[in-house]
Amino acid sequence: KKSRRARLIIKKLRGLRHDHEIETEVNHFISASHAQSCGDAEEWTNSGGAFVAMINDDRMWKLLVCSLILQMAQQLCGINAVFYYSTMFFDGLIENPLIGTAIVGGVNVAATYVAL
């Protein structure tokens, strides 16, 4: 009964139409649950063992390093300041400063696409 209700909720939330799509989604949830289960979860949480295991995993280590480098690069290049202060910068220059901020965001998206 709970299984059927869970599938109905997943179907409604995800907007799925076919049974095989729902089963795929359920299988993803089940496999993620199995991957996260590790003996005594409270012991792992309190001792930091899960964090150490994550750091020791080569794929996770690469992901962590990449995300840290990306965050540092954003701070060092000052792009966050441009987005944060753009509304104040455009205030008085154009009628609606939010349009200027939207244009800055659009240029950022276009430049990111070109850079890829």
Image (cartoon, rainbow, N blue to C red):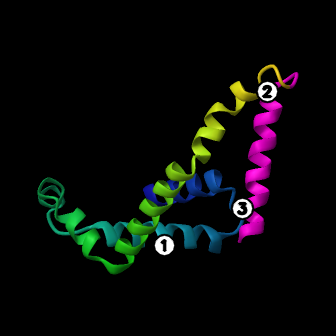
Circle 1 or circle 3, nearest the eye: 3
Q: Helix, strand, or loop for circle 3?
A: helix
Q: Earlier in the sequence, mark 2 or mark 3?
A: 2
Residue 63 quadrant? bottom left
Q: Helix, strand, or loop for circle 1?
A: helix
Residue 16 position in % (x across, y down): 68, 61
Q: CA distance from mark 2 to mark 1?
A: 47 Å
Q: Earlier in the sequence, mark 2 or mark 1?
A: 1
Tell me which amino acid carries mark 2. Answer: Pro
Name the residue beneath numbered marker 1: 27
**Could you tell me what secondary structure mostly forms the magenta stretch?**
helix
Q: Residue at x 79, y 26 (%)?
A: 97
Residue 15 position in % (x across, y down): 69, 56
Name the residue beneath numbered marker 3: 112
Q: CA distance from mark 2 to mark 3?
A: 23 Å
93 or 24: nearer the viewer? 93
Q: Helix, strand, or loop for circle 2?
A: helix
Tell me which amino acid carries mark 1. Answer: Asn
Q: CA distance from mark 1 to mark 3?
A: 35 Å
Q: Which residues are magenta?
A: 94-116
Few, some or many residues within 10 Å of mark 3 (<14, 14–19, 20+): few
Circle 2 or circle 1, nearest the eye: 2
- Spot the residue most to the bottom: 58
Tell me which amino acid carries mark 3. Answer: Thr
Residue 17 highlighted magenta (yes or no):
no
Q: Residue at x 48, y 72 (%)?
A: 27
Q: Is residue 109 above or below residue 86?
A: below
Position of the C terminus, as image quadrant, is bottom right
Residue 44 quadrant? bottom left
Position of the N terminus, as image quadrant, is bottom left
Name the residue beneath numbered marker 2: 97
**Horizontal relation, residue 43 to residue 60: left or right:** left
